[in-house]
Image: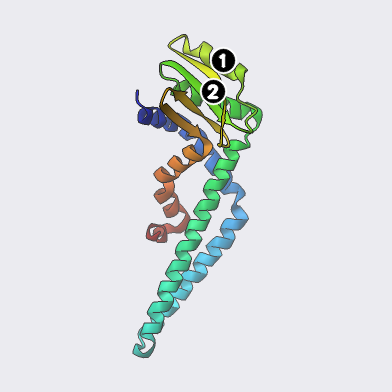
Amino acid sequence: MNAEQVVEKILSQGRDEAEKLLAEARSKAGAENQRLEQELSDFDAESRKLAERAADDKTSRMTAAERIAQAKELLATKNRLLDELFDRVRGKIENLDHGRYTELMYRLLKDAAGTGEKEVIIGRNESRIGQELIERVNGELGGRAHLKLSEKRADIGGGFILSAGNVRVNAGADVLVGQLRERSEMELAERLFGNQGMMG
């Protein structure tokens, strides 16, 4: 199994947890979402007004420029909301309570282990992934793979990096959320902004 397949498996196995975290993040962002939805509604109303004014040849050039400015502002608002949403997802992963976090890391480590010996590199401030968790995973692997907690630390928040020689699989929170964003951004934009979501 190559590194790309391992990452694919990690994402597949972790999708339910990530979607749950995403749903929690969206529910907690209610007030901000309402404010942004009002902004979008205002933008839409203003765009309709500008379209009506565009019928007047004397103002059509100004209207086109204003509509472009409004479209840029709308796109910036969409991107800001999606940035905030995925920042919250990453934060939720990194700040899970000890039990949920170690259970998630247990599943990801087990799924990413493959075969052979690998080092588990964790973040500089990581305290929840320790020898006890590594031994639990090794016990579950039944000898087909062996994980060892590395003395090296990495500049990642939550998650881990699996290293075997020159091959590394990055399952840090930033990478996992980034790949989740790549896969779900279009769908989320559609759900958050309706047909306008496809513009961004």
User: Contact, CB < 8 Å: mark 1 with mark 2?
Assistant: yes
The quadrant in which the N terminus is found is: top left
Residue beneath the point at 50% across and 23% down: 109
In this orientation, does residue 78 appear? Answer: yes
Rounded to the nearest whole Å, what is the CA distance between mark 1 and mark 2? 8 Å
Identify the element where label 2 is drawn: helix
Residue beneath the point at 57% across and 46% down: 88
The image shows residue 138 at horizontal and vertical percentages of 52, 13
The image shows residue 57 at horizontal and vertical percentages of 34, 88
Residue beneath the point at 36% across and 28% down: 5
**Mark 2 residue crowding within 10 angstroms, few (<14) / some (14–19) / many (20+):** some
Q: Which residue is mark 2?
A: 106
Q: Which residue is mark 1?
A: 136
Above or below, 133 relative to 55? above
**Residue that sits furthest to the bottom in the current view:** 58
What amino acid is labelled 1 in the image? Arg
What amino acid is labelled 2 in the image? Tyr
Identify the element where label 1 is drawn: helix
Residue beneath the point at 43% across and 68% down: 71
